[in-house]
Image (cartoon, helix red, strand yellow):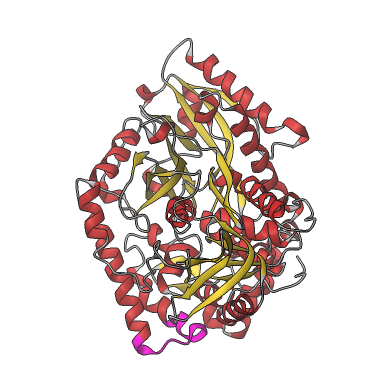
Amino acid sequence: MTARMGTARLGPAERAAALKQMGEQELDVVVIGGGVVGAGVALDAATRGLTVGLLEARDFASGTSSRSSKLIHGGLRYLEQLNFNLVKEALQERSLLLQRIAPHLVRPVPFLFPLTHLGWERPYVGAGLVLYDTLGISLGYPRGVPGHRHLSRRRALKLVPSLRRKALTGAVQYWDAQVDDARYVTTMLRTASAYGAHIASRTQAVDFLREGERVTGVRVRDLESGAEFDVRAQQVVNATGVWTDDIQELVGGRGQIHVRASKGIHLVVPRDRIHSQTGIILRTEKSVLFVIPWGRHWIIGTTDTPWNLDRAHPAASRSDIDYVLEHVNAVLSVPLTRDDVEGVYAGLRPLLSGESEETSKLSREHVVTHPVPGLVIVAGGKYTTYRVMAQDAVDAVAHGLDWRVPPSCTDRIPLVGAEGYQALWNSRHRLAESSGLHVARIEHLLRRYGSMVDEILSLIDEDPSLGRPLNGADDYLRAEIVYAATHEGARHLDDVLARRTRISIETFHRGVGVAQETAELLAGPLRWDDEQIKREVEYYTKRVEAERLSQEQDTDQEADAIRLGAPEIVPAAHPNPNSNRV
């Protein structure tokens, strides 16, 4: 994509320029929150011609948006709950993401549903999947994935030799899609920047600006420098997920939205621990459990339990981990143990509160409200439907502006890296030959950067040492680390090891083994001295130690207390709900 009004780079210089621009001009809209919904709002608004700023207190996608199941799907369990509209909407979005918006980042993935009952179960599940496939092609959208198929027990075991023979009577295989959730958010923010949005992480909205009842902007603190300044905007959008209620408190708690957090944990194990050519989906007593192919690994999850503790760093307890292992081991011929677990991560779903006491039954629908003039709040929903949520939020923004705003066009806007991706994929062997990299490396880069791969290859041309893999995480090239800082908004070691790459969950050392090398690579573009390199490595190491120890605790409360023992390298401020600005 040719940049229209800005740059797709999110490096240190671009961050400084964005902060300067936000402080000097009144914007049409400022977005609070740099997760998938906030990024979607920024892109939707920018492509409608609005002037846009986006503020994220931590790193982009550092909350829920980097800790999901990494699936783009309609949700079979919502179909069983007869929520046809949600499933239909999500499947239409899946088709758009696969084929138009981000074919370089979103790809089909197969799942095997083992059947355990003779007679009634196969027609019941089959009928549901017929409906699932049918909803996926409604309104003229092509599905983008193959249809489901029925399998005998023998054929199912051929696909998944690791299943216990007695654990199934047969199976049905269907297809959904998957994505690197954090990478998708960063790519969307880069696209918004290319269309003129001003974007900054480690920048917190600590207060609202008011003229009488009307919200006219936000008071902002640059958490890196400590500087505070005002950002004025005609409309402010709160897209903070599980922090929605906190932001509502800044306007005196006036809002119709109440969000409850539900914790979901995932385990990551090496690919050779489960012999299978397909993902697996299993019923549990409360929800479903996925075994998801993820490069040289499997992601296994998830849980669904209430969480009322620290929302920035939800902790997985021993009982969470044991629950997942127990349920997956029920169908495996060779059980997994805790020694097989490379990585563990926990995320929080922002669920709209309802009558149900069980979080697994709370709504995954989204809602948009205008609690006071100048403020729009969007909450709920699921990752797959972020674009619809963003469109609805900007429609509400448009309603509050004094001039006619064009309709959303994000269903026709490819993310940076999408245009030309298929042609480059078809030419990957030639690209490997010209670059000197193995074709497997080129495939890895194309699936992460799409047609922006030339920017990575240019770094290697300038410094051939960047073409070497990291020592201890050889799926990733050294160039990718530098690029994370120069182009993708990474500002700290944790940003790179946990979100620009997934080294923190894909290695048994959880990133500690490459922390020093990674920090030294980041030192150049981020202008770190030896003391800052040392500090970054120490903070990251303490984080991993705290996470490991928290995962040995029996309860959420014990796990949370230990995880909070590791300080953040850039602590977020605590907004003051009693400020006289509000």
In terms of depth relative to the viewer, which is nearer, 119 or 405?
405
Q: Which residues are magenta?
A: 520-531
Query: Can the viewer see residue 86?
Result: yes
Q: Does the segment drawn in magenta span residue 561?
A: no
In which image quadrant can residue 519 be found?
bottom left
User: Above or below — where is 12 with respect to 560?
Assistant: below
User: Above or below — where is 531 with respect to 112?
Assistant: below
Q: Position of residue 270 (x, y in %)?
A: 39, 51
- Image quadrant in which the N terminus is located: bottom right
In terms of depth relative to the viewer, which is nearer, 309 or 118?
309
Classify residue 153 as left or right of residue 437.
left
In terms of depth relative to the viewer, which is nearer, 422 or 22?
22
Question: Of helix, strand and loop, which mostly describes the magenta segment?
Answer: helix
Q: Position of residue 152 (x, y in %)?
A: 51, 21
Classify residue 318 as left or right of residue 470.
left
Classify residue 436 as left or right of residue 498.
right
Check the image and name the residue furthest to the top. Answer: 119
Classify residue 138 as left or right of residue 351.
right
In terms of depth relative to the viewer, which is nearer, 463 or 318?
318
Seen at 63% across and 82% down, the residue is: 461
